Amino acid sequence: MNNLEPVKIAVRSLYDLQKVRIELSNRVAAHREMYGESVVLETIRNSAMLARDGEVLLAKAVGVAVAGVDIAEWLQAVRGVGPVMAGVLISEVGDPARFENVGKLWAYCGLAVERTCDTCKRPDHSKSVDNDGVEVIKWNIMDKDGVLYCAACNDGKSKFRGHAPRRSKGSKSHWHVQFRGKLLGVLAPSILRARGDDNTYAQHYYQHRERLLGKRCGLSPGEHKKTLRDADAKTTQEALQDNGCTNGHMHRKALRYMIKMFMQDFLVQWRTIRKLTVRPPYKEEYLGKVHHEAK
Ligand SMILES: [Zn+2]
Ligand SMILES: [Zn+2]
């Protein structure tokens, strides 16, 4: 019932073939531009079309393999999640037992919020492993009447600021870059495009956008970049809304929020099916309130 291997090899094969097909198409386009049409180009173009046929077959195979996994039914009922995306989600997450809380899954997907001190730039917590192999979290937070200050600075004014995980220079990325790209670049737009009154995740997106409009952005005006969503504006300054944020930035925040809500339900559902306990993320445990926000 829960053989993940067929899902994994079908998904991987599909992406391998897709990659080759895209390379072939690009090659044809580049050569035609420089040297014009030829028999060779036509053959390569035909081969790319055959690869397309292969992708259709492999996508079907992903669907067949996915149907044999316990979480498939739930996933397929979500608006915007097709069989291939279900296969990607199942094979990337793999075993829900690996993530005892959603914070760990978000971190794995590159969706966790990191918070650093505005003054000393230290993170709000550090992790280590004790002699028994248990993960220990040391908080760098001073809680003063519900306001959180940096314990390292200890000046009663240095606060933390949440942001999406960044890749520090020279260090290997600690999250699954490709998976994150699939979630935000493929799954999120697909959910937004899907129709139906029962598209709860699209509703999450729109409700969160609405909330963001009434909230000041944590980034300074200069930290914003104009995007396609702000195409009407000539400059970044012009793109800034009353809340100090741009449409592009609010769009990205709401997309991240929507995907996080989806991943949370996905994990809870899958762990429940497997009769595993479900714990809230550790940040919620520490602060007693929910922090989904990233700047
Ligand atoms: Zn500090
Ligand atoms: Zn903003």
Image (cartoon, helix red, strand yellow):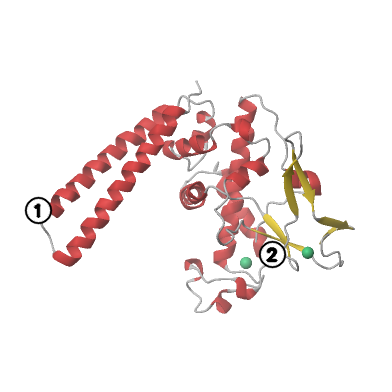
Q: Which numbered mark, 2 or 1, is in the foreground of this view?
A: 1
In the rendered image, which quarter is residue 13 located in?
A: top left
Q: Position of residue 8 (x, y in %)?
A: 44, 33
Q: Position of residue 142 (x, y in %)?
A: 85, 57
Q: In which quadrant of this rendering is ligand 1 seen?
A: bottom right
Identify residue type, mark 2.
Gly
Q: Earlier in the sequence, mark 2 or mark 1?
A: 1
In the foreground, 190 or 130:
130
Q: Is residue 146 visible?
A: no
What element does badge 2 sit on?
loop
Identify residue type, mark 1.
Val
Read off the residue under disc 1. Answer: 39
In the foreground, 160 or 195:
160
Residue at image position (61%, 52%) is: 257
What element does badge 1 sit on?
helix
Vertical placement of residue 273 versus 50, above or below: above
Q: Is residue 110 visible?
A: yes
Instruction: Name the outermost residue toward the right.
Output: 145
Q: In the drawing, does residue 188 fall left or right of residue 44? A: right
Q: Position of residue 135 (x, y in %)?
A: 73, 40
Q: Are marks 2 and 1 in contact (CB under 8 Å)?
A: no
In the foreground, 224 or 121:
121
Read off the residue under disc 2. Answer: 214
Residue at image position (39%, 38%) is: 12
Q: In the drawing, does residue 84 fall left or right of residue 47? A: right
Q: Position of residue 102 (x, y in %)?
A: 66, 41
